[in-house]
Amino acid sequence: MVMFVDHNQGHLKIIRSALSTLVYPLQYIVNLPVEAAEWVSVSLATHNNLLEENDRLKRDHLLLNSKLQRYEILESENQRLRNLLESSFRLNDRVLVAELVAVELQSFRRQIVINKGQREGAYDGQPIVDAAGIMGQVIHVGPFSSTVLLITDPNHALPVQVNRNGLRAIAVGTGQRNKLLLENLTNNADIRVGDLIISSGLGQRFPSGYPVGQIEKVTRDPGEVFAKVLIKPSALLSQSREVLMVWPYKNINETKSTTGNETIGDKIE
């Protein structure tokens, strides 16, 4: 009867509204643990997803950095090879690119080992240069490698001349990494700091006109006949990773007959 009256006349609507208001806090309290559990579950899932994504991004970042470093290494290597190619055009001789495989670390000895030897036609006394200047000459040839005496070794001497005026002298090694000593120049010789020193071609071993270094210091002692002249080498003796083996024209036929291989150190034209 009450339900009939309420349905037709709506007298109990106010009572139901009041009861709903009283019951709502109880319903909220009852549902709170369920909602809290759902919130914790969603939060944990989101947290785990963020951790996984963070780990993935770290791995991707590390991989990209590794690739970027490799690209920078390749770019640097390509630049060095381009410089060597430009240098080979200046030489106008047969050349072959070789890589350093070892460096002599003993005091006052300046030697390197390159990865080309008898099978490529290397020979004792063969000139070795880089993109910037003369590095040295081969002193020992093995089947697959060669030992190079650098121009800074105390046992090395190189006929040179001052590019500005053609004045001839001998550049000898000092045993120091970036120092050469210019000999046979008198105190009144026309030499200046900054003068470019080039190979003279005398001795018929090194290509003529190729950079050797620049005069760094000139000391004139009135009590001495010769001036003391220090040169900084043009070649990057402590940095070059690739070098050029040079076959001057006079050695082409000799190299061919020795190796039987006419494609060794082909001239770049």
Image (cartoon, rainbow, N blue to C red):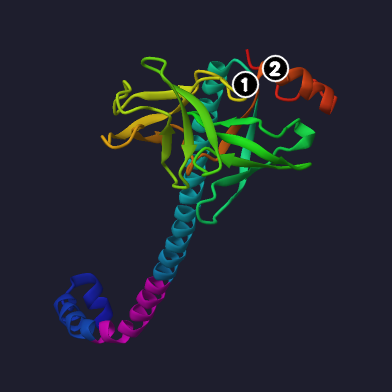
Q: Residue 150, how many percent across, how many down?
A: 55, 40
Instruction: Please indicate whether residue 145 sits to the left or right of residue 188 in the image.
Output: right
Q: Amino acid at mark 2?
A: Lys
Q: Which residues are magenta?
A: 26-44
Q: Residue 180, how many percent across, how many down?
A: 43, 38
The mark closer to the camera, 2 or 1, is: 1
- The quarter of the picture where the N terminus appears is bottom left
Return the residue at label 2.
250
> Which residue is located at x 14 percent, y 77 percent?
14
Crowding near pointer 1: few (<14 within 10 Å), some, many (20+)? few
Describe the element under mark 1 as helix, strand or loop: loop
Q: Amino acid at mark 1?
A: Gln
- In the figure, 176 relative to 32: above or below? above
7 or 55: nearer the viewer: 55
Q: Residue 264, how many percent across, how many down?
A: 75, 25
Crowding near pointer 2: few (<14 within 10 Å), some, many (20+)? few
Q: Tell me the quarter of the picture where residue 228 sits.
A: top left
Earlier-in-chain disc, 2 versus 1: 1
> Which mark is on residue 225?
none
> Which residue is located at x 66 percent, y 30 percent?
126
Return the residue at label 1.
204
Magenta stretch holds residue 30: yes
224 or 76: nearer the viewer: 224
Describe the element under mark 2 as helix, strand or loop: helix
> Which residue is located at x 55 percent, y 38 percent?
156
